[in-house]
Image: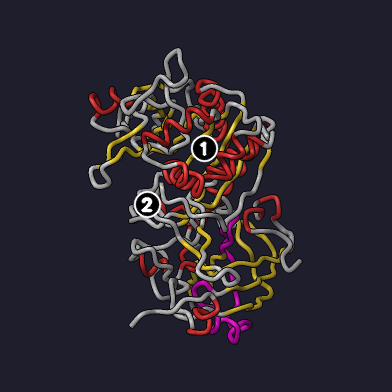
Amino acid sequence: MLRSHNLGEVNEKLVGKKVKLCGWVDSIRHFKQMTFILLRDRYGKVQTVISDKSKFSKNLKNVTLESCIKVEGKVKKRPKGLENPKMASGNIEVEVSKIEIFNSCPSLPFDMKVDSLEDMRLKYRFLDLRTDKMQKNIILRSEALKAVRDFFYNEGFVEIETPILAKSTPEGARDYIVPSRVHPNKFFALPQSPQLFKQLSQIAGFDKYIQMARCFRDEDLRSDRQPEFTQIDVEMSFIEQDDLIDTMERMLKYTFKKVLNVDVKIPFKRITYEEAIEKYNSDAPDLRKDKTNPKEFAFCWVVDFPLFEYSKEEKRYKSTHHPFTMPQTGKNKLDFNEKSKAVAYDCVLNGSEIGGGSIRIHDSEIQEKVFDILKISKAEAKKKFGFLLNALKYGAPPHGGIAFGFDRVVQIMAGEDSIREIIAFPKNKEAKDLMLGAPSEVSDKQLKEVHLKFGK
């Protein structure tokens, strides 16, 4: 190993011992005879001291801010009165006997110590990710990801990866479409969610499905949206609404305790959709007692959503959630209509919808009536969802699920105003990747290969 310790391991226990340390130059201070270099890695910071500058004169010329270097030396206590209580290693420093420059850094395009324009930060994201805030946020995201997975694995869930190249289902938001080279004039679509696949997983007998799913939606961006995002995607068989809600509450309680050491109280408050609109004028009410308090976490469930909503533009009813949502029926399974409520639920945290789901339709007669209300013909239904409708005939169990916006959950956990602050390489407000320069043009040859050409 090039280093004997990471910087978080250097403390008073190592006083008198020689160490080899690697990292980036966080700051550099030159005096007449001495130079102080604050070295940084993701584990911490350590002050290193060069007592005789003349011995290192050639190397020191190339040691600039954010240069990647290696130092060797002996750990010693700092002089009395010069300790730094703000640093974990603030009682020690390393007397440098050798220095090696892996890579010298040119002048920085922005000041990494102060808030800078977001587009500049995104253009040089590899630098921005070195800052204390971004290191903290990305590590928090990693810990949350592990906690979620650990919970579900301990509960007996199976993680199943579903296709990225899938079929366009225009009932939702706009798809990102991918032209096929081997099938002229036909297209794949990037999944807006793994909805159909996770329902198929239940028909296949995997009664507890989980996936940290990458999803894609070509929609207008906001501070809490990205064109590609991560869902905690869940589906379960032989359950009712209360069963799923109980499991998700326990997952959130476990995650917040594990990552933030915050005790989330369960069960969460439940509010009907009608009550939420009437009392809070929102279907995602903020129930915090103190609303700029980022450390207060007020969860609730909004339930009893309308099954359908009327579209004046299309002059027809559309599904409030999606067309596979189970209606709340009477004694007869077909006792529902355009005004009926759904067995659907949203999880809300601090005024943001962080998850939504429903009990699914597993009965072909109920599904056919829903399609009739939506004015989706049998031919159209077969074309769009034929594989699912066919699969539902083969012993489909009662099932339901939910999807949490993982990025949005982590954003709230981190106390950030923008979802871009907790994603390593996000797009900007215009859905551009400024670092890569994407989206970008492609060559005529590439277009020809997928049977496309631009008009005049």
**Residue 189 to residue 109: above or below:** above
**Residue 443 to residue 275: above or below:** below
Residue extending furthest toward the right? 1
Amino acid at dot 2: Ser
Q: Which residue is mark 1?
A: 260
Residue 52 x, y percent position in the rendering: 60, 78
> Circle 2 sits in a helix, a strand or a loop, which is it?
loop
The residue under the point 66% across, 51% down is 12
C-alpha span from label 1 to label 2: 19 Å
Tell me the number on the disc at residue 73: none
The front one of 84 and 408 is 408
The residue under the point 31% across, 32% down is 283
> Which image quarter: residue 414?
top left
| Number of marks present in the image shown | 2
Q: Which residue is mark 2?
A: 418
Q: Earlier in the sequence, mark 1 or mark 2?
A: 1
43 falls in the magenta region: yes
Q: Is residue 153 visible?
A: no
The residue under the point 52% across, 32% down is 252
